[in-house]
Image: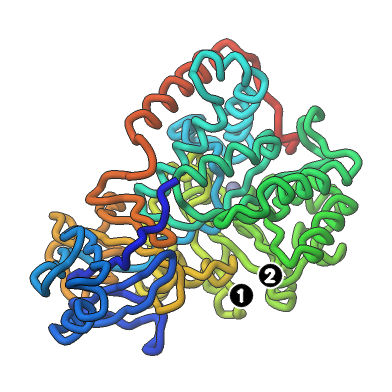
């Protein structure tokens, strides 16, 4: 793992969007800089010659010297404090995703969620689980680590520095490898460790509930000291977790002062089936058994009633909206405007690469805004500034990360997006936020810094051998999908058809 730089680091660009600080989240700064030491930001603001002189006096010359990102290894005078073309902003915070899905892009498309799970996710994760030893021998490293490293590469590519990974289904057994991938990549992660005890593949049911609780205890024992990793309960679904198990997991979360993360009310058919079978909505169920509170993060919440929204608002539970996955799978879209009107905390995320089918957070933010504008025939809804906050500052607050904004004392998590690319030209101070949402294709992320470490430098990922990661995942996918063509139908989810 790359250590945090020993010397203070400086980056300066045409534009700076702090997304926080004394002037509020909407401040836009022309010619801005960020200075950090170790893992923390120490100064942020407009760059002036006086600022440059002050920084050089404090750190330059005979001192340890400033490292200038995109410029001098050791700044000696003001000419070394170069201004990069582009915009500085906080790294994106992904509040819901699945690191086991990168090999699944473009697979089992044009079908709804349950068919997609059984046509893509359960085939793949079942395959790498069952043939893990043989695949490890053949590929030189475990198929899980190969998959999780590709997910880390994808995140760094798109400027995601922090994420909550819903580590569900068969993956719940492989916390060690996702921790290893995160450590190698240098990102920050909450691992929501999966659980299920009904309506799922019988081989992986957690019975009794103590099995799932013990898994969490073991993960904390092994990885509790990792500086950039947190373990939380991540029961897979409302329908695959009975009350005893959910109450036990929520009890664990409360005892550890942490979150609980779960999929809720995603596919219309499954939600309707749940209501019919159990006589209550998923949210009604969570509320009745006492697991709905400010520490519960619901992914999706697409198909819900006014009563559900009232309960979520009253209990101060949070919602992660995943517009890419919800539209591609035909799940529908959650009532985002109504959620916001009721004061519910909402974050925008991508979901896993298999359903999204990318980790482009700006693309997810764009689709969220575009959809609500069209649905309500109101162009004023979800302006660019608001959706940018929903992929940075808002999810950071939701997940308890000291990130999502550029302010002194925050973790040094920031990205530089090159605004001189053809699709982003011309960018000025008055349209920089709007261009990010409406004109970016996500590939313009030129620098990524996480916890003070430069993870992407002039488009090159520094912590991973990108070509090797890609080669490995392509070989693995080839093996998985040639096997899939021979394998029979998979029924992993247990969800109704
Ligand atoms: Zn998901």
Looking at this view, is 51 or 75 the one in front? 75
Is 277 on the left-hand or right-hand side of 220?
right
Query: In the displayed structure, would residue 216 be above or below residue 420?
Result: above
Q: Nearer the viewer, residue 87 or 311?
A: 87
Q: In the picture shown, does residue 64 fall above or below 364?
A: below
- Numbered disc 1: secondary structure: loop
Disc 1 residue lies near ligand 1 with CB under 8 A? no
Residue 309 lies, in percent from the top left, at 68, 71
Identity of the residue drawn at 28% across and 81% down: 45
Q: Count neighbours of disc 2 (C-alpha within 10 A) and say few if under 14, some if 14 to 19, many if 20 or more.
A: many
In the rendered image, the residue lying farthest to the top is 486
- Where the N terminus falls, by quadrant? top left
Mark pair 2, 1: CA separation: 7 Å
**Residue at the farthest front position:** 62
Name of the residue lying farthest toward the left: 79
* Image quarter of residue 303: bottom right
Instruction: Verify CB contact (< 8 Å) between mark 2 and mark 1.
Output: yes
User: Which residue is painted at 45% across and 77% down in the image?
Assistant: 409
Q: Position of residue 96 (x, y in %)?
A: 56, 54
Q: Which residue is under mark 2?
A: 317
Task: Point out residue 176 in the picture as x, y percentages from the top left corner.
Answer: 63, 39
Q: Secondary structure at mark 2?
A: loop
Q: How many marks?
A: 2
- Residue sitting nearer the eye, 226 or 405: 226
Determine if residue 374 is in view: no
Within-10-Å neighbours for mark 1: few <14, some 14–19, many 20+: many
Q: Residue at x 83, y 45 (%)?
A: 214
Instruction: Tell me the residue that label 1 is attached to.
Output: 344
Q: Residue furthest bottom?
A: 22
Q: Quadrant of the C terminus?
A: top right
Determine the residue positioned at 34% across, 35% down: 466
N-terminal label among 2 and 1: 2
């Amino acid at each position: 793992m790359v250590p945090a730089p020993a010397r203070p680091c400086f980056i300066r660009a045409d534009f700076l969007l702090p997304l926080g600080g004394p002037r509020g989240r909407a401040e836009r700064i022309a010619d801005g800089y960020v200075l950090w030491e170790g893992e923390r930001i120490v100064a942020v603001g407009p760059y002036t010659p006086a600022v440059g002189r002050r920084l050089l006096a404090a750190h330059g010359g005979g001192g340890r010297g400033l490292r200038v990102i995109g410029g001098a290894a050791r700044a000696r005078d003001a000419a070394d404090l170069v201004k990069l073309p582009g915009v500085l902003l906080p790294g994106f915070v992904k509040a819901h995703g699945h690191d086991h899905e990168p090999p699944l892009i473009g697979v089992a498309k044009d079908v709804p969620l349950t068919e997609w799970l059984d046509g893509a996710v359960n085939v793949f994760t079942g395959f790498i689980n069952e043939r893990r030893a043989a695949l490890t021998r053949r590929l030189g490293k475990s198929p899980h680590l190969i998959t999780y490293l590709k997910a880390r590469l994808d995140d760094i590519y798109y400027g995601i520095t922090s994420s909550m990974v819903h580590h569900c289904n068969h993956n719940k057994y492989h916390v060690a490898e996702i921790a290893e991938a995160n450590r190698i990549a240098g990102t920050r992660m909450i691992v929501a460790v999966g659980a299920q005890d009904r309506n799922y593949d019988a081989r992986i049911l957690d019975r009794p509930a103590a099995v799932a609780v013990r898994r969490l205890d073991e993960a904390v024992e092994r990885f509790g000291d990792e500086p950039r990793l947190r373990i939380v309960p991540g029961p897979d679904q409302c329908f695959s977790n009975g009350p005893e198990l959910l109450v036990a997991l929520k009890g664990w979360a409360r005892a550890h002062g942490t979150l609980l993360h779960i999929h809720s009310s995603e596919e219309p058919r499954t939600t309707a089936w749940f209501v019919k079978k159990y006589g209550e909505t998923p949210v009604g169920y969570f509320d009745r058994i006492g697991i709905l509170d400010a520490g519960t993060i619901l992914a999706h919440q697409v198909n819900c009633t006014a009563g559900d929204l009232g309960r979520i608002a009253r209990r101060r539970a949070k919602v992660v909206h995943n517009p890419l996955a919800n539209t591609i799978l035909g799940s529908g879209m959650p009532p985002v405007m109504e959620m916001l009107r009721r004061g519910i905390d909402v974050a925008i995320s991508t979901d896993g690469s298999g359903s999204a089918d990318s980790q482009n957070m700006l693309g997810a933010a764009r689709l969220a805004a575009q959809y609500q504008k069209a649905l309500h025939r109101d162009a004023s809804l979800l302006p660019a500034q608001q959706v940018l906050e929903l992929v940075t500052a808002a999810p950071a607050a939701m997940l308890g990360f000291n990130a999502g904004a550029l302010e002194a004392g925050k973790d040094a998590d920031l990205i530089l997006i090159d605004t001189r690319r053809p699709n982003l030209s011309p960018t000025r101070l008055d349209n920089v936020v709007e261009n990010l949402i409406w004109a970016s294709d996500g590939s313009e992320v030129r620098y990524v810094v996480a916890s003070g470490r430069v993870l992407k430098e002039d488009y090159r990922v520094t912590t991973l051998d990108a070509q090797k990661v890609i080669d490995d995942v392509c070989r693995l996918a080839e093996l998985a999908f040639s096997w899939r063509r021979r394998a029979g139908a998979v029924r992993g989810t247990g969800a109704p058809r």
